[in-house]
Amino acid sequence: MKLQAGQTAVITGAASGFGLEFSLQAAQRGLNVVMSDVQVDALEAAAQRVRATGVQVLACAGDIAQACVVETLVGQTLERFGAPHLLFNNAGVAHGGLIWEHTERDWDWVLGVNLRGVAHGVRLFTPEMLKAAERDAGYQGHIINTASMAGLVCAPNMGVYNVTKHAVVALTETLQQDLSLVTDQVRASVLCPYFVPTGISHSHRNRPSELRSSAKPTQSQLIAQAMSEKAVSSGKVTAADVALATYRAIEAGQFYIYSHPNALAPVQTRMEDVLLSRNPSDPFKDRPEIGQRLRAALRGGGAG
């Protein structure tokens, strides 16, 4: 896809992390930027930062897990700029722990943002992008859904997050196949980042009050939170690096986008497990001490 000034990019989860960097990269290319986020104050600060580059910015606050919020986002985008050329379904939250310890509210929260938010964006924006393609033979559009390496492997103690990210990969693969049936002007990509310093390990700060659990976190959930914070904060690849790589992938028409392309060995192992009808491989085979500590903590901490 050829990116040029005057096109429009819509980004969810735009107040921080990948979303903010996607917005800044769009601005560098002279695109109009539509920024959505659930955190109102952070969104306004981020929007001001992007406006300072001289491009047009539309900031729309709201929880994209709610269909009505995305409907409003679509309406405001069309009214201000017309159909977007880039759509980044990027907003995401994280929650770990043993899979049977997730409460109904945990499932509702994480599925709502990570999966339904993407689904809302796809089902509501894609028809508008297809209409734009029908009207203009020169129109090009691209939809980028943020999944995770957790959408390609199944790390333990990350159950609900894994489920949503695998679903986003499947959704995006299907989206690309479906788009190819009806048009050559709109494409899709899936971003699968590994550990990158963003605000996702602190996403509980924006959890809606009605979806907060009254129960104390379990041992497994506390461990998952600590491990996530340590892994994310220690990442050497930055969100800006990932955003730049993503834009280059869009321009190249690349479907799978990785933040750490040299870290795909676990994905290959999982695929081989599937193809060879092998039981799932030990995720800690290369770092057995981590597995030993985790098992010891869980078996001795009352989480099982």
Image (spheres, grey):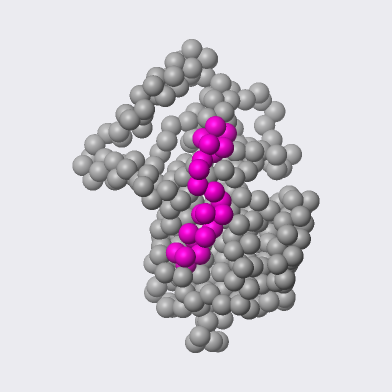
46 versus 273 height, above or below = below
- Which residue is at the far top? 300
72 versus 206 height, above or below = below
Q: Nearer the viewer, residue 57 or 106?
A: 57
Left or right position of 258 against 208: left
Q: Main secondary structure of the magenta part?
A: helix
Residue 163 seen in this snapshot: no
Residue 248 seen in this snapshot: yes
Q: Is 148 inside the magenta-drawn segment?
A: no
Residue at 51% x, 54% y is 242
Quadrant housing residue 135:
bottom right
Q: Is 237 inside the magenta-drawn segment?
A: yes
> Could you say where residue 93 lies in the image, as x and y percent from the top left?
60, 44
> Could you say where residue 145 lies in the image, as x and y percent from the top left?
51, 58
What is the total number of numbered labels drawn onto the structure image? 0
> Could you say where residue 243 lies in the image, as x and y percent from the top left?
54, 58
62 versus 188 height, above or below = above
> Could you say where residue 122 lies in the image, as x and y percent from the top left?
54, 64
Residue at 56% x, 77% y is 4
Magenta stretch in the rendered image: 229-250
Quadrant housing residue 136:
bottom right
Left or right position of 204 against 95: right
Residue at 57% x, 73% y is 85
Residue at 56% x, 21% y is 219
